Image: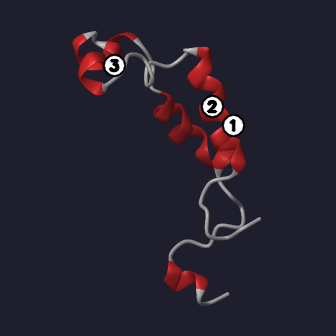
Amino acid sequence: MCCEFEFNDKLLDFIAEEMQNCKYGDFFFNCESERIKNEVRDKTFSMWTTIELHKDDFFRNPSYVGSLENMSRI
């Protein structure tokens, strides 16, 4: 796996699937102002919180090196 990308393909799969499932409110309505008007943050969970909580377990690329400075050491 490539060392330049912090996250693996499971993250993209998760986002695509959850976007269709409507479990999280992040993609409700057409824009952020509509989400605010309809109080989506107060009524639903954020997908990004779930990703942040589980990134090391599921979504992190084990080959990720970090910054360009770190890559020069490879």
Which residue corresponds to the image point at 42% horizontal and 17% vertical from the top-left?
Answer: 28
Q: Quadrant of the C terminus?
A: bottom right
Q: CA distance from mark 3 to mark 1?
A: 23 Å
Q: Position of residue 54 (x, y in %)?
A: 60, 39
Q: Is residue 37 left or right of residue 16?
A: left
Secondary structure of residue under mark 2? helix
Secondary structure of residue under mark 1? helix
Question: What's under tag 3, amino acid-wise?
Answer: Arg
Q: CA distance from mark 2 to mark 1?
A: 5 Å
Question: What's under tag 1, amino acid-wise?
Answer: Asp
The numbered disc on residue 13 is: 1
Relative vertical location of residue 54 with respect to residue 17 in this rendering, above or below = below
Colour scheme shown: secondary structure
- Looking at the rendering, which quadrant does residue 34 occupy? top left
From the viewer's perspective, is the residue at label 3 or at label 2 nearer? 2
Q: Is residue 58 left or right of residue 51?
A: right
Which residue corresponds to the image point at 64% horizontal and 42% vertical from the top-left?
Answer: 11
State the residue position of label 2: 16
Circle 2 Cα neighbour tier, 10 Å, few/some/many (<14 / 14–19 / ≥20): few
Relative vertical location of residue 20 with respect to residue 9 in this rendering, above or below = above
State the residue position of label 3: 41
For the residues bearing labels 3 and 1, Cβ distance under 8 angstroms: no
From the viewer's perspective, is the residue at label 3 or at label 1 nearer? 1
Circle 3 Cα neighbour tier, 10 Å, few/some/many (<14 / 14–19 / ≥20): few
For the residues bearing labels 2 and 1, Cβ distance under 8 angstroms: yes
Secondary structure of residue under mark 3? helix
Q: Position of residue 25 (x, y in %)?
A: 44, 18
Q: Position of residue 8 (x, y in %)?
A: 68, 52
Question: What's under tag 2, amino acid-wise?
Answer: Ala
Of mark 3 and mark 1, the one earlier in the sequence is 1
Q: Quadrant of the N terminus?
A: bottom right
